[in-house]
Amino acid sequence: MAPSSTQRLIIIWYQTAVFTYIIYDIIVYEDSTDGDYSYIFDYAVNKWNNLGNVTIYNYYQLPNQDPSLRIEEIYDPNNDYIAYYDYDFIDEIFLITYSDTFFASISDDTRKRAILHEFGHALGLFEFNLTVDVNGQLVGPAIPEHRYNAMNQGVRDFPLEPGSCDIEVYDYLWE
Ligand SMILES: [Zn+2]
């Protein structure tokens, strides 16, 4: 019997883990922005925290724990990205960076979807639609339920919380 698309997604995901660093099932982030969109970050953090296996804290909630993640904003109108996740090798900290100019032009729902997606990376989830299979082939829209998940890159119409594939992969990683 062929695996279901969700099972297949987990198998595929397993080939392409995202670089992350989680100890004691917590992530502590520091918000170095002007705070205009802190409510968006609170929203996304609550949605992921509701899944129950990893808890994401703002640094002010756990001041004795060094942050492993920093939220930054950039002011470049030519930047093509709403937001992205990467690693600062100098400061040795993960980064979620959002474009302040982009954010100013989009809806709250779109901001929430973008930040849900970036925290998904911080939790170790890869882009579902950019994931490669065991033969190195890109897996595209062959798995339709990708579309309704936060980790489908570039899609801005998924429900405002992690979807079924997001949750399956999250549970596979952290349960
Ligand atoms: Zn992404």
Image (tube, rainbow, N blue to C red):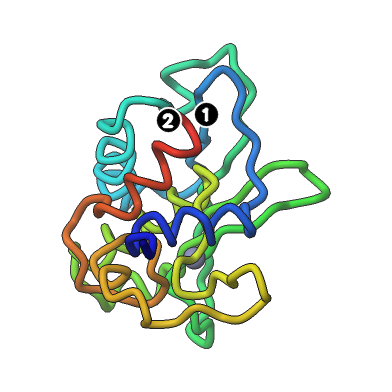
- Per the image, the residue denoted by label 1 is 28
* Residue situated furthest bottom in the rendering: 78
What amino acid is found at the position of numbered circle 1 in the picture? Val
Type of amino acid under label 2: Ile
Q: How crowded is mark 2: few (under 14 residues within 10 Å), some or many (20 or more)?
A: many
Q: In which quarter of the image is residue 104?
A: bottom left
Q: Quadrant of the C terminus?
A: top left
> Could you tell me residue 77's position as x and y percent?
48, 84
- The Cα–Cα distance between marks 2 and 1, rounded to whole angstroms, is 6 Å
Whether the residues at callouts 2 and 1 have beta carbons within 8 Å, the answer is yes
Query: Which residue is label 2 attached to?
Result: 56
Point out the residue furthest to the right here.
90
Q: Where is residue 2 in the image (x, y as percent from the top left)?
A: 38, 65
Residue at the spot x=42%, y=72% of the render? 153
User: Which image quarter: residue 149?
Assistant: bottom left
Query: Horizontal placement of 36 versus 153: left or right?
Result: left
Toward which corner of the image does residue 148 lie, by quadrant? bottom left
Q: Is residue 76 left or right of residue 21?
A: left
Q: Where is residue 68 in the image (x, y as percent from the top left)?
A: 62, 34
Q: Is residue 17 above or below residue 155?
A: above
